[in-house]
Amino acid sequence: MSIKALRDLPGVKDLNIQEFEQIGITSLADLKAALADEARVKEIIKTLSGVGPKTVEHWKTALKEEAKPSEPKETKETAETKEPRSKKKEKEKEVEIVEVVEPEPVVVDSGAYVAKAKPELSDETAEELAKRAVISGRRPAFKRQEWHRYAMLGEKWRKPKGIHSKMKRRIKRRGPIVDIGFRGPASVRGLHPSGFEEVLVYNVDGLEDIDPKVQAVRIGGTVGTKKRIEIEDRAAELGIRVLNRMV
């Protein structure tokens, strides 16, 4: 069906014609110019009742097809002078047509993954954090004396204090003892692995004095679910990172 007026467009009703006039579109030429502008397309979708993005795309396709010149019908003479199909196939093989496929725009959903906030660190602090990570990787596991012999002792560290303790005297093959030499750099001691300074909060009011550039919050363990949700929502508004989010 040929499109000669706005009324011929698919999905257009009598009410839509009046709405077109409200936004200054009275002909197909005006509509074509409006469809080329994204702001005007949004205005059309908002103003016209029953018209959405799919309908607008349908209009664009219909107008493009209408603008294409109609191909002349084949006569008997042209049909007789046609080349045989075998020759056509050979020519098609010789000429390779490369189609350029444009990548589709990526639409981020509302529930899509969002990168976590990162702290603003100086070069020195970043280097110290990297050194601390290397030292932590080399640090042995400190286990209490006789942990392998009596299960009731567990593996939690306890300093050996017996007067005959071979571990206390640092005899070989007795396990390492906690020493100051195993510590990391003092300037980044106590920081979260991400580089943030941790602040413990128990309610929404605790977020007011937080600096989101260098500080992150950790919600207390005794806080209930309802209050946790309030804290997380308020932290998202202020741009504060929560280290122990529920989700």
Image (cartoon, helix red, strand yellow):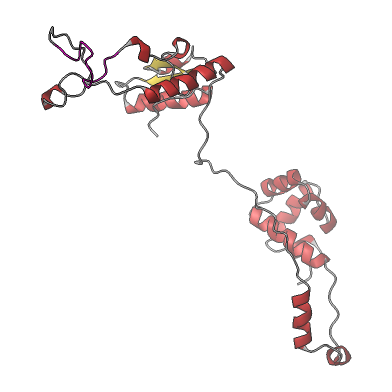
Q: Nearer the viewer, residue 243 or 13?
A: 243
The reply to whether residue 45 is visible in this rendering is yes
Say left or right for 184 vs 35: left
Q: Residue 31: image x %, image y %?
A: 79, 54
The reply to whether residue 13 is visible in this rendering is no
Numbered range of the magenta stretch:
165-178
Q: Residue 35: image x %, image y %?
A: 76, 52
Q: Residue at x 44, y 10 (%)?
A: 186
Q: Residue at x 66, y 53 (%)?
A: 103
Q: Nearer the viewer, residue 85 or 182?
A: 182
Q: How many marks?
A: 0
Kindly report the secondary structure that dominates the magenta region of the rendered protein.
loop
Question: Furthest residue to the top?
Answer: 163
Q: Residue at x 69, y 58 (%)?
A: 101
Q: Give yes or no for residue 42 being in the magenta stretch.
A: no
Image vertical order of residue 129 relative to residue 34, above or below: above
Q: Residue 243: image x %, image y %?
A: 42, 25
Say left or right for 121 vs 2: left
For the C terminus, the quadrant is top left
Q: Residue 16: image x %, image y %?
A: 71, 55
Say left or right for 35 vs 218: right
For the N terminus, the quadrant is bottom right
Q: Residue at x 18, y 12 (%)?
A: 160
